[in-house]
Amino acid sequence: MSVVARSLVRLYPDAFRERWGALVEEEAHGAGWKSWPDLIAGIAHMWLHPAVWPADSPAQRQRRVATMGITVALAACFLSHLVAEQGGPLPADGVRKGIMHGCTTLLLLGIALVAPRPRPTLGAATTLLRWAVRRLAVPTALGATVVALVHGGVDATASPPTLRTAVLAGWWIALGLGAIQIPRIFTGVGADAVVPPHPGRLRLGVWTLAAASATGGATILGASLAADGLHLLGAAVGVGLLLLTAVCAGTLRDLRDLLDLASTD
Amino acid sequence: MQANDAQTLVLCALADGPLHGYAINTAIEELTGERLGPGSLYGALARLESKRLIEPLDGQGRQRPVRLTPLGREVLERELRAMARVADAGLRSLGVNPA
């Protein structure tokens, strides 16, 4: 039983685990298996609210929120791209396509607003570059291999289905890995290389991301339900984007607390 | 916050003085009849610390007790007064003497 509790506690973010992990484990061990659902809910809650993790300074909390914003934006980009490339429910032209272009523009604007700024020093640039190479080497190599295969003679009509599926899976895995690894660059480099945006700018960025994911999610979900028969992938992506909007709403509430604290300092 | 909100319960438990996590949950059990789950308890402690409503005491090892900050005491008092007003009005509407 304690093995399960210990394994669950390991799923908490590092900062939380270092501060409270041993005590959570003791409490979970004492409460037994009945505490596991509460523990799992607590873990999910903590990952969704990085502003709450134990921190040395308000700037560290802002940097975590900025990383969270980038993660949400990349997840939204990935989902939108997935539904667009895999024959989604949206018509090839018309108002809905215009809406999706608008959402992409909003997502890019949101990323620009929430992204931590590199410090203007050679050391910071070197650190950032080193972490980028370390984190993005695998997805870049995988993506480049897929592109080389496709442009090097893999014929979609003549190739065996297994190879086509493998190439397609390789492409999406490369994109997915890239979306996971980019936020990890910012968590890796730390305060020496990047500074978080001001809370007000961060708040505007998260609002922009929320608007983009809500509009995109509602549009894709609506088109999926209006199609002849339910478009399963489109509906799943639409719901996913709306869930990302809910994540943004939680982040905005955390940011309000950060701003309140900043105003009392 | 609400009367059964984990954060309010933790603040109430700390009103008497500094406690560590296990003792906070024991105080909550005495108050409500049941312990908070570990995710709820330590999630509430992390959130309260991030809002600077509680703070850890130094030099007490792994079982570091936490205490209310002056801001935490002020927020707790405000919350309890608001709850008391609601309870008072509700009981009066039911025809029950609040006292």
Image (cartoon, helix red, strand yellow):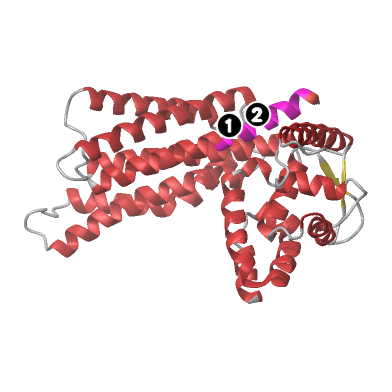
Q: Residue at x 65, y 29 (%)?
A: A256
The one nearer the camera, B30 or B51, is B30
- Is disc 1 placed on a helix, strand or loop? helix
- Is disc 2 placed on a helix, strand or loop? helix
Instruction: Indicate whether A265 appears above or below B17.
Output: above
- The quarter holding residue B81 reads top right
C-alpha span from label 1 to label 2: 6 Å
Instruction: Indicate whether A6 appears above or below A11.
Output: below
State whether residue A252 appears in this view: yes
- The quarter holding residue A191 reads top right
For label 1, count other residues whose C-alpha is less than 10 Å away and answer few (under 14), some (14-19) or many (20+).
many
Q: Are marks 1 and 2 on the same chain?
A: yes
Report in which chain the residue with disc 1 lies.
A
Q: Residue at x 81, y 54 (%)?
A: B31
Q: Amino acid at mark 1?
A: Leu
Q: Where does the image place residue A9, in percent across and percent down from the top left?
A: 64, 63
Q: Residue furthest front?
A: B95
For label 2, count other residues whose C-alpha is less than 10 Å away and answer few (under 14), some (14-19) or many (20+).
some
Image quadrant holding the C terminus of chain A, namely: top right
Q: Is residue A252 magenta?
A: yes
Q: Which residue is mark 1?
A: A252
Report in which chain the residue with disc 2 lies.
A
Q: Which residue is mark 2?
A: A256
Q: Is residue A166 left or right of residue A106?
A: left
Extent of the magenta region: A250-263
The one nearer the camera, A20 or B38, is B38
Q: Where does the image place residue A225, in percent across and percent down from the top left?
A: 24, 39
